[in-house]
Amino acid sequence: QVQPSESGGGMVQAGGSLRLSCAAPGSAFIGKTMGWYRQGSGKQREGVAMITSGGTINYAESVKGRFVISRDSAKNTVYLQMTDLKPEDTAVYYCNEFPARPGGDIQWGQGTQVTVSP
């Protein structure tokens, strides 16, 4: 199994932007549909964006028009550009296969904390 490494989180004011990255060694993401997920305090983890190996993209309604997912297969990296951030976007953000498979090739990583102040 592979554990991705998420980075790029931080503290921003409402309206700010952040770019998250998710990388893994080798070719763990090749051919897989990948997604970004988030888990707010006291909430269940939810998917916010997904991208297929062919580039088809979908977003949760709550982030449409504000978040952009992309991937660089050569670098085995998935990105999430977040703009116009809102306090309700505060969460730990993770990447994984979409949908995530218990016992699959990709484990959950440590995530990266995003905190948006009013």
Image (tube, helix red, strand yellow):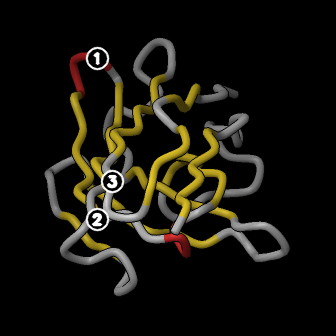
1 vs 3, front mark: 3
* Residue found at x 79% / y 67%: 41
Of all residues, the one furthest to the left in this rendering is 55
Quarter of the picture containing the N terminus is top right
Relative placement, left or right, of 69 versus 12 is left
Q: Are marks 2 and 3 in contact (CB under 8 Å)?
A: no
Which dot marks residue 115?
none
Q: What is the crowding at mark 1: few (fewer than 14 residues within 10 Å), some, or many (at least 20)?
A: few
Q: Nearer the viewer, residue 42 or 2?
A: 42
Q: Say what secondary structure mark 1 lies in.
A: helix
Which dot marks residue 84?
2
* Residue found at x 47% / y 55%: 36
Q: x%, y% of residue 3?
A: 66, 28
Q: Is residue 76 above or below residue 29?
A: above
Q: Is residue 10 above or below residue 62?
A: above
Q: Amino acid at mark 2?
A: Asp
* Residue found at x 76% / y 48%: 103
Q: Which mark sits nearer the N-terminus, 2 or 1?
A: 1
Q: What is the crowding at mark 3: few (fewer than 14 residues within 10 Å), some, or many (at least 20)?
A: some
Q: Amino acid at mark 1?
A: Lys
Q: Which mark sits nearer the N-terminus, 1 or 3?
A: 3
Q: Which residue carries the number 3 mark?
A: 16
Q: Is residue 19 above or below residue 34?
A: above
Q: x%, y% of residue 28?
A: 47, 27
